[in-house]
Image: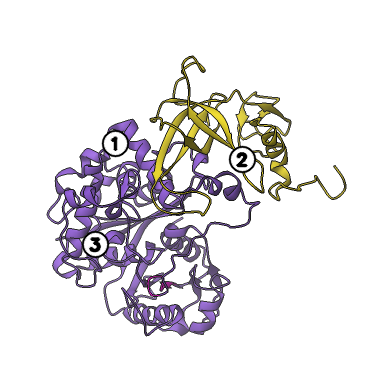
Chain colours: A purple, B yellow
Amino acid sequence: MKLRPAYIAGVAETPLGEVWDHSELSMAAVASREALAEAGLTFADVDALFTNYMGEEGTVQLGEYLGVMPRYADSTDLGGAAFEAFVHHAVAAIHAGRCEVALIAYASRQRSRRSRKMTRESDNSSLSAQFELSYGLPGPLGHYAMIAARHMHQFGTTSEQLAEIAVAARSWAAKNPKAWARDPITVQDVVESRLICDPLHRLDVCLVTDGGGALVVTTADRAKDAAKRAVRILGAGESQTHWGIAQMPDLTVTAAAVSGREAFGMAGITAADVDVLEPYDSFTITVLLALEDLGFCGKGEGGAFVEGGRLAPGGALPALTSGGGLSYNHPGAFGLLLLVEAVRQLRGEAGERQVPGAEIAVAHGVGGLMSTASTVVLGND
Amino acid sequence: MTDQGPDLTGLPADPTTAPFWRAAREHRLVLQRCRSCGRYQFYPRPFCLSCSDPELDWVEASGGATVYSKTTVRIPVTPDMEPPYVVAIVTLDEGPRLTTNLIGDVPEIGDRVSLTWRERADLPPLPVFRLAGDGEGQPRPEEGAR
């Protein structure tokens, strides 16, 4: 059966950084309106709504706020990977004829509110409380730290190699006027920054900022009045591995091994075809494992792979081109902004940080306690 | 057991883990072992993760383990624990892994460790691990079953 192709026809960022003149809902509304305008659509056209972490009941409060009563709604809770999963689900819903115009939106003010809401349960009967929190493991930092420690032990990966990822993100951020942290840093700055959970340093860890965004997934037909070129969704996939870190079958293999295989398989591409990569960078180690599990290099080779500025401007694999969660913006769930940047790179509208001739881009979300992964492959028609 | 389920006084409010915590009060670390395939598992479930068989026995672990990964936590997380302290994942000799603390001289990843207990005020003691002394347990391959 020949499936109708689905497109991202509009994208927008919310106000970013420290936002004092909006609520989360008004930020999401502003971005949604802008993304719909790019797509040549309005709120009245939206028949599917996707969000999470925006209220007490999934999509319900955002729908009310926007005046949208969708016939398809999804609040899948995959943390940072939720938004790539929403694209995956929107494509499936469009293929099944269950919707035509899917709005995906998110906003957070965790910097101005000074709270990064942890999703961990506080009830002493949860499995997390019984077998993890009682040992003083800070989530998600401690989980990622033990993953990094294991990768170092098993493959000889070094702190300097992880630092290359933070340096690459910062060098892209210097080219992005909307990035939060734009001052140059060196590998030495990263490894000499404060150790917080060995082997991770302060500069191996993402920002806490206000931010968010919106995007519109629709059919070619509905996107025909789009103000800007729509980008085709070539493939998508998702998976999950664990919640308790001791339940992760192998600390060096993430859910990206499955989400990448699914997404690349659907798109009919390999890692070698990717012109620009937007990997989730909650921590430097998050990127390193994605590079391995998505097939950009072999298992255990990520450390050597990122050396010499390979991900940085001018490198062989442009990645983190917005500056990433490490230097541009990290509103708790960063996955939507990865997609926004990927679309802008494919449209050729990324300004000073534009990757010349980008035809295929990958956005790869990671969520929870390195628990979830979702991968989206985008391309120009 | 009554119609109201097991007595969970002084235990986490989770009936499925009560046998684990009751044994912990006696400083015994217990795991489930499948009657059908013989695999051990932790935490407890009403079926075997390997073969789906519902018949599982509680058996005491040897207390020997190998450090699979670890981190030194240098930020305040809970009022009960003053940083820095070490959180680790250990692979028990029986196969399952658990998250725990390493106390005393800090072992490296791959080192042999042995079981000890940390008392708590309102809940059963927690299984924690320390560097194994000479002759404690036989070294095992690091890549144990889950």
Q: Residue at x 35, y 79 (%)?
A: A19
Residue A336 visible in rendering: yes
Residue A178 lies, in percent from the top left, at: 24, 72
Same chain? Circles 2 and 3: no
Q: Is residue B79 above or below residue B127?
A: below
Q: Nearer the viewer, residue A344 or A251?
A: A251
Mark 3, residues whose alpha carbon is within 10 Å: few (<14), some, or many (≥20)? many
Point out which mark residue A298 bears: 1
User: Is disc 2 in the same subunit as disc 1?
Assistant: no
Identify the residue position indicated by label 2 in the image: B119
Could you say which is closer to the camera, residue B75 or residue A301? B75
Q: Amino acid at mark 3?
A: Gly
| Image position of B125 (left or right of A120) | right
User: Which contiguous range is marked in magenta?
Assistant: A104-112
Please indicate whether residue A75 sits to the left or right of residue A362 in the image.
right
Q: Amino acid at mark 2?
A: Glu
Task: Specify the subunit that label 3 lies on.
Answer: A
A107 part of magenta stretch: yes
Q: Is residue A379 visible?
A: no
* Disc 1 element: loop
Earlier-in-chain disc, 3 versus 1? 1
Q: Nearer the viewer, mark 3 or mark 1?
A: 3
Q: Secondary structure under badge 3? A: loop
Please, which chain is the residue tagged with disc 2 on? B
Labelled disc at residue A323:
3
Between A154 and A280, the one lying in front of the other is A154
Screen quadrant of the N terminus of chain B: top right
- Image coordinates of residue A36 in percent, x first then y, are 37, 79
